[in-house]
Image (tube, grey):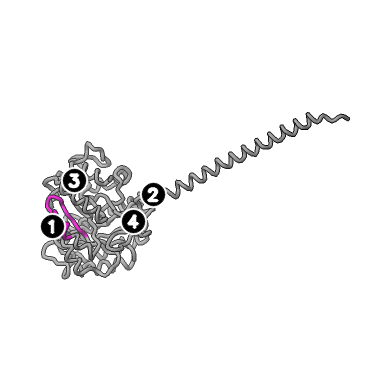
Amino acid sequence: MVIDMKKILLFIIISLIVVLGFLYLKKDNNQNINNEEVKKDVQSSTTVDNNLVSSNGWLEIKNNTLVNEKGNMIQLKGMSTHGIQWYGKFANEEMIKKLRDEWNSNLFRIAMYTEEGGYINDKSIKNKVEDVVDTAIKLDMYVIIDWHILSDGDPLKHKEEAKEFFKEVSQKYKNKPNVIYEICNEPNGNVTWDNNIKPYAEEVINVIRENSKNSIIIVGTGTWSQDVDKAANNPLNDKNVMYALHFYSGTHTEWLRNRAKDALTKIPLFVSEWGVSDASGNGGVYLDEARKWIDFMNENNLSWANWALSDKNESSALLLEGTQPNNLEDSSLSESGKFIKEVMKD
């Protein structure tokens, strides 16, 4: 039997080429799989936390500023409704979702008036409030339940009703980091921090804390939430309480910013209501002064809710009169609305 060494050698070479080619293709395929896994890992590790609840969780106060559960500063920005009994049609899921997705909002404030045809006269308004809270939770946003005193000036006037209301809602939402409680919007008239507001707040806060130990609570200050200096000199004994500062750029200027700056050395502030009009909600708009306030809030990490999501015929309304619900087109925005869209998206 004659062995053809040339044929054997050729067979071995071809076999080696086939085996090496197979190994190369397998390695390349594995490398592609690994590259995809690495890419996913990189994307996961470099994704910046969004500004919503799922990324920030329970909020708390550190060094007189708002931080998330990781200890990082967070600024909440959003819209306040006008009176829910009048303009509740705008507080719906589609509109709130547009504010979140198109305007970069992470906060929604529900102004539940106590008097003026509000909760004291019509307890069923609570159902609308809870519907909006549930919507905000669904949309992964923070939400303020605002006990909106105005004509009733002294928070002690409806203290028992407030305790009953906040007992019920804090029980329902005790496990929801989304929910912030604002327990007296704008104390005003012949009331003081020491004699009226603080005693009221201590009782209502105790009711909330029986159910929710960690929720942020906002307490209004005297003279329509301008007297933050009085609260700073005699603060409440609760680590997660913030104090309301309200301004309207046509009325409140540098003097109030200076007062707020001094107060911030002692207490945390939350601008739970502000507008570009004068204090009546009308007049103006005063955009130059509003920009100074925006800079001040950004520099001091102050969270805010703008007044107001309505089509009321006044300067502070976000929408032009007659605008239909769910319409956030530029053509339907007031001058105020166009400005708020700009600053909220920044």
Q: CA distance from mark 4 to mark 3?
A: 25 Å
Crowding at dot 1, Cα within 10 Å, few <14 / some 14-19 / many 20+, comes out as few
Crowding at dot 3, Cα within 10 Å, few <14 / some 14-19 / many 20+, comes out as many
Q: What is the secondary structure assignment of the residue under circle 2? A: loop
**Sooner in the amino-acid sequence: mark 2 or mark 4:** 2
Residue 342 visible, this angle:
yes
Q: What is the secondary structure assignment of the residue under circle 1? A: helix
Q: Is residue 256 magenta?
A: yes
Q: Nearer the viewer, mark 1 or mark 3?
A: 1
Label number found at residue 48: 2
Residue 124 visible, this angle:
no
Q: CA distance from mark 1 to mark 4?
A: 33 Å
Labelled pair 4, 3 in contact (Cβ < 8 Å): no
Q: Residue at x 58, y 39 (%)?
A: 29
Look at the picture and state if 295 lies above or below 234: above
**Residue where numbered disc 4 is placed:** 178
**Residue where numbered disc 1 is placed:** 255
Q: Nearer the viewer, residue 217 or 45?
A: 45
Crowding at dot 2, Cα within 10 Å, few <14 / some 14-19 / many 20+, comes out as few
**Residue where numbered disc 3 is placed:** 317
Q: CA distance from mark 1 to mark 3?
A: 25 Å
Q: Nearer the viewer, mark 2 or mark 3?
A: 2
**Sooner in the amino-acid sequence: mark 1 or mark 2:** 2
Q: Is residue 16 magenta?
A: no
**Sooner in the amino-acid sequence: mark 1 or mark 3:** 1
Q: Nearer the viewer, residue 95 or 284?
A: 284
Query: From which residue to which does the magenta span run?
Result: 244-259
Q: CA distance from mark 1 to mark 2?
A: 37 Å
**Sooner in the amino-acid sequence: mark 4 or mark 3:** 4
Q: CA distance from mark 2 to mark 4?
A: 20 Å
The quadrant in which the N terminus is found is top right
Q: CA distance from mark 2 to mark 3?
A: 33 Å
